């Protein structure tokens, strides 16, 4: 019985570490992308190397396209 409790404790500790690392990396990645999009960096602009990261190929007609900023907010939340 003691061994089962010990194994479960190790699994929970590993899960806690994984979730912390995943959360921090997600905030760094999506935070940087959001800031880059907000200040309109050339690397994220149409034709830029990282343009594919922001789903910028969606046609919105004459209106300014609201899809990329909406997706960033959803991802960060």
Image (tube, helix red, strand yellow):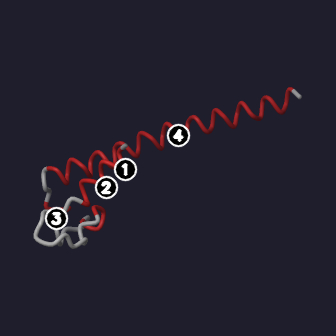
Q: Nearer the viewer, mark 3 or mark 1?
A: 1
Q: Secondary structure at mark 4?
A: helix
How would you rate the neighbour count of disc 1 (Cα within 10 Å): few for under 14, some for 14-19, many for 20 or more? few
* Outermost residue toward the left in this view: 62
3D distance between C-alphas at marks 2 and 1: 6 Å
Give 54 or 20, whichever is nearer the viewer: 54
The percent coordinates of residue 25 (x first, y second) are: 41, 44
| Residue 75 image label | 1
Residue at the disc numbered 3: 45
3D distance between C-alphas at marks 4 and 1: 16 Å
3D distance between C-alphas at marks 4 and 2: 22 Å
Q: Secondary structure at mark 3?
A: loop
Q: Quadrant of the N terminus?
A: top right
| Residue 71 image label | 2
Residue at the disc numbered 4: 19
The percent coordinates of residue 39 (x first, y second) are: 13, 50
Q: Secondary structure at mark 1?
A: helix
């Amino acid at each position: 019985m003691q061994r089962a409790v010990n194994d479960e404790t190790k699994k929970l500790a590993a899960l806690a570490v994984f979730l912390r690392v995943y959360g921090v990396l997600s905030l760094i990645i999506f935070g940087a992308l959001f800031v880059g999009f907000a200040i309109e960096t050339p690397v994220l602009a149409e034709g830029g190397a990282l343009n594919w990261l922001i789903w910028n190929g969606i046609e919105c007609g004459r209106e300014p396209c609201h899809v990329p900023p909406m997706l960033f907010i959803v991802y960060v939340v």
